[in-house]
Amino acid sequence: MNPLPFPDLMPFAPEIIMLSAATLLLMLELFVKNRTIISAICLAASMGVILILPQSQGITFNGMFINDGYSMYFKIIFIVGLVMTILISLKYIDRERPQRGEYYSLLLFATSGMMIMASSKDLVVLFLGLELMALSTYILAGIKPLNIKSNEAAIKYFMLGAFSSAFFLYGLALLYGLTGSTDIYQISERLRQTEPTLPLILSMIMIVVAFSFKIAAAPFHMWAPDVYEGSPTSVTAFMSVGPKAAGFAVIGRVFYVAFESIQSDWSIALIVIAVLTMAVGNILALCQRNIKRMLAYSSIAHAGYMLIGIIAGTSESLHSVLNYLLIYAFMNMGAFAIVILLEKGEDIEDYNGLARSHPIVAAIMLVFMFSLVGIPPTAGFVAKFNLFLAAINAGYLWLVIVAVIFSSISAFYYLRIVMNMYMRDNISETPEILLSPSLGIAIFVSLVMVVAIGIVPSLVVG
Amino acid sequence: MIPLSWYIGLSAVIFIIGLIGFLVRRNLIIMFMSIELMLNSINISLVAFSHYLQDIKGQIIVFFIITVAAAEAAIGLAILVALFRNKNSIHTDDIAEMKG
């Protein structure tokens, strides 16, 4: 037997850069105590990935790994999430937990996991990427070992994450038994030749359950509010963008390709989940007092909107989901950056009278909240408009009507923060703001992107 | 020769035992053991499929699953130890700092 030829490493180059930077940081943090240098290395690695991404298209590792336009778009979203997280956590994480460098290394490992997920052409590679991402984020959630809330967040995330992995693997095992392959495209080909059977439907349901856990879709969302509240805010910001986008990346790949032949079945399952997710996310967000919890429910609700794009099943709707994820990354990161900026700002009441004490901060928060509701001329409007338009074109008018109703409910809890900032007086002392240059850059970039995409949608759409 | 369906049945039964264990038990270590039970039931079905399809891939996947499960155990138990130091309990009813 001939030995296998050496694989073409070029399509894997972005991951190689990311993983080597992560490993390098693990060693470097022993000697380098300056956090700025460590985060500069992270940013350099992200730049390297962005630069090498256009040249790295192709299939490698015996057809297990694919880097195409779809995965490249997702990788850009992951890098946006990573860069923003590094910028907002530079001062914050030192305050929360000094003398630890593995935080940045874990962020890079988690991002590498997501990139592998987005690029996987084989379910086994997908599983390994998923676990690399998940195991790193479990540790990130519990990065404050002396803080009991952080411990609790980590253990809840870990237990339910491991539980959902088991579901995914059971679905994988059934698919392997049915088709004799784990390659997503081969599975699709073999399933097209056979009638849908009960084991196939069972495996599809198992995989739907597993991915719903990952994107925090109801009824598998219960971990999200606790984990988002307990984790350090910078980690929460990271989790609400990266792993969610990675979940959508694999949903798109697995359902559109592998389960293509049973699209009518999985779209029914996803419709139920999408409606439930929008309802749970938006209604439970109404009664939250902690802003991180509220943003957790809001991210659940946004996952529900994005699922509509997946259900619609056209390439136009899939594009709109990608755009939505990118825009969501900017506006959510911005909102979390403001939460970090106000040290005491975890309670919604803390925002009372912010417009009087810090008018600029209040105005920026106003933009992000408007964007999350979807009010023009912000990016959130562009995202929702395109998504709903694509779903209507695909013939899911009633689903869009449901989404718009829930979306108008969401205005209540986002605008309550705006109301607190502008129309209430502060009873206690004025909140302190802790502006560092990197945090300022993060807020500025997300603000510019949110406004610019809102005014010139062609920046991302098309 | 034992038919394939027996293996798949065994794997499904063990998976369901693990599932029920995870949902019913309130001790975090036992919940974690239930997850391991679920993962190992998947290994049984993968090996059985691999044998009946005469395809080595299924057995390779099993090694990946074992490796990942080991990594998961390391991280999970580390988180559990950190929690126990602060809380002196690994009972899920005691872990309720956050609600709502």
Image: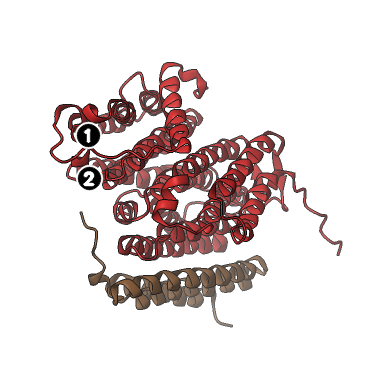
The residue wearing badge 1 is A417
Which image quadrant for residue A274? top left
- Residue at point 20%, 54% (across, down): B100
**Label 2: chain letter:** A
- Residue at point 30%, 23% (across, down): A375
Label 2 element class: loop
Q: Nearer the viewer, residue A102 or A65?
A: A102
Image mark count: 2
In the image, what residue type sits under mark 1?
A: Ile
- Mark 2 or mark 1: which comes first in sequence? 2
- Residue at point 70%, 45% (across, down): A13
Q: Which mark is residue B3?
A: none
Q: Please determine whether, in this image, residue A187 is positioned above or below residue A425.
A: below
In the image, what residue type sits under mark 2?
A: Asp
Can residue A382 be spotted in the picture?
A: yes
Q: Nearer the viewer, residue A131 or A335?
A: A335
Quarter of the image that includes the N terminus of chain A: bottom right
Residue sitting farthest toward the right: A2
Tell me: A232 left or right of A347: right
Residue B87: x %, y % from top left: 29, 73
Q: Please determine whether, in this image, residue A153 is positioned above or below residue A430.
A: below
Q: Which mark is residue A347?
A: 2
Category of crowding for the residue at label 1, using alpha-carbon neighbours closer than 10 angstroms: few (below 14), some (14–19), many (at least 20): many
- Residue at mark 2 to residue at mark 1: CA–CA distance: 10 Å
Q: Are marks 2 and 1 on the same chain?
A: yes
Q: Nearer the viewer, residue A396 or A5?
A: A5
Q: Please determine whether, in this image, residue A63 is positioned above or below residue B78.
A: above
Residue sitting farthest toward the bottom: B1
Q: Please determine whether, in this image, residue B54 is positioned above or below residue A209.
A: below
- Figure colour of chain B: brown
Q: Which chain is red?
A: A
Residue A52: x %, y % from top left: 69, 37
